[in-house]
Amino acid sequence: MKKIWLSSPHMGGKEMDFIKEAFDTNWIAPLGPNVDGFEKDVSEYLGNQHVAALSSGTAALHLALILLGVGSEDYVICQSLTFSASANPILYQNATPVFIDSEPDTWNMDPEQLEAGIKYCLSHGKLPKAIIVVHLYGMPAKMREINLVASKYGIPIIEDAAEALGSRFDGIKCGEFGVMSILSFNGNKIITTSGGGALVSRVEDYIVKARFLSTQARDPAPHYEHSSVGYNYRMSNISAGIGRGQMLVLEERIKKRRSIFDFYKSEFSDLESISFQNEDINSFSNRWLTCITVDDKSCKTTNESIRIALNNGNIESRPIWKPMHLQPVFRGFASFLNGTSEYLFKHGLCLPSGSNLDEADLRRISSITKRQFIK
Ligand SMILES: *Cc1c(COP(=O)(O)O)cnc(C)c1O
């Protein structure tokens, strides 16, 4: 039986043309026509914002914090239920993370806990410097409520849209909500550049500065002159070539991922103990990953026994992200909790959702999963 991966790269066909052009013209560097072209493609997709193509989504988040002036005296609020890359850059800046639990509808930042977290920071004498909101597995967070809280206190939102390219809320695309937003094009994301990311903003100055900082912060001079700390965070022209090809098939990829969600939803419709992440009436998810919770009152099965059964069938599935407030590396930082992220971690499972899965693959996954309930 061939291996089924959780989410593997899915080329569209035009990627090699852009890479060949880079070779033919010898633009084998972290700059060139593909980098410019890819930034233009992403910009046009996300409401003509300014875009800097970078080496990773993590690099984009790090630069966003630097550009907001986050330093060692500052609090940064971050969703607890996420991938560690959302929170690590807070520690790169020696700032203090404050973790916020999720609400049970979208599994993203709970607006009430957010306000509690802000009040905690204020009681320690400081307004948080930024709020990092994540659209987990492609599902838009409750941006209306979160925006209300953020603007009430005047705190900028950094939108971690690494998993949510193509998702929308209130007709606005994820990646358009933040003062700055970040994207990831890692190999497992909805589209990929093999590895890469982007920083996106309406504020041109942020993106101009991000390009400067990400190319070693060279001041204008014939020699190498530096008055600030630089980084090597720019995207390569080869990777950007893959990205240009991938942007051509983004809408197809979203359609396919959503159809995979629909397949699982209908296959498991009789299983009361399986629940899904819900789209709000105003939201549209790219359904990057279909995730379920398994809460079987008769205890025939658990998320973990399904994971093991799938693994024995050569199928990769994965637990939901372990919340940041439970991670050893973030021990001791304040967190504002309501039990949701711990419940989701305990009961959740991400099912294979790659856009290159076929009907036979999906049937294999479904039949092994369903078998766990009739033991
Ligand atoms: C993938 C991911 C990142 C990091 O992106 P990289 O390109 O892998 O550095 C950040 N946040 C979330 C939620 C992610 O899923």
Image (spheres, rainbow, N blue to C red):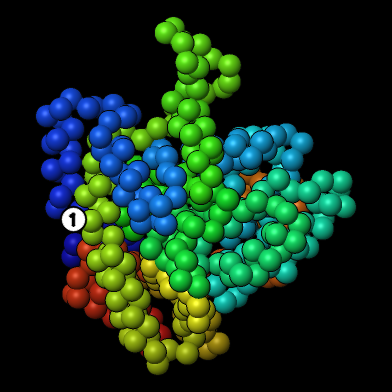
Mark 1 burial class by Cα count in 10 Å: few <14, some 14-19, many 20+: some
Residue 122 horizontal side relative to residue 226, left or right: right
Spot the residue most to the bottom. 270
Check disc 1 and report its element: helix, strand or loop.
Answer: loop
Three-letter code, disc 1: Gly
Residue 370, x across and y down, in percent: 35, 83
Q: Is residue 53 visible?
A: yes
Which residue lies under the disc numbered 1? 12
Residue toward you, 338 or 285: 285
Image quadrant where one finds the N terminus: bottom left
Residue 69 horizontal side relative to residue 217, left or right: right
Residue toward you, 52 or 13: 52
For the image shown, how many numbered marks are present on the structure?
Answer: 1
Q: Quadrant of residue 39?
A: top left
Residue 322, x across and y down, in percent: 56, 58
Q: Quadrant of residue 68?
A: top right
| Above or below, 62 relative to 214 | below
Residue 73, x across and y down, in percent: 77, 36
Residue 84 horizontal side relative to residue 290, left or right: right
Q: Is mark 1 within 8 Å of ligand 1?
A: no
Q: Residue at position x 38%, y 50% from top? A: 43
Q: Residue at position x 50%, y 73% from top? A: 170
| Above or below, 238 relative to 283 | above
Q: Residue at position x 28%, y 65% from top? A: 251
Q: Is residue 136 visible?
A: no
Q: Residue at position x 50%, y 41% from top? A: 204
Residue 349, x across and y down, in percent: 45, 69
Residue toward you, 42 or 119: 42
Residue toward you, 195 or 177: 177
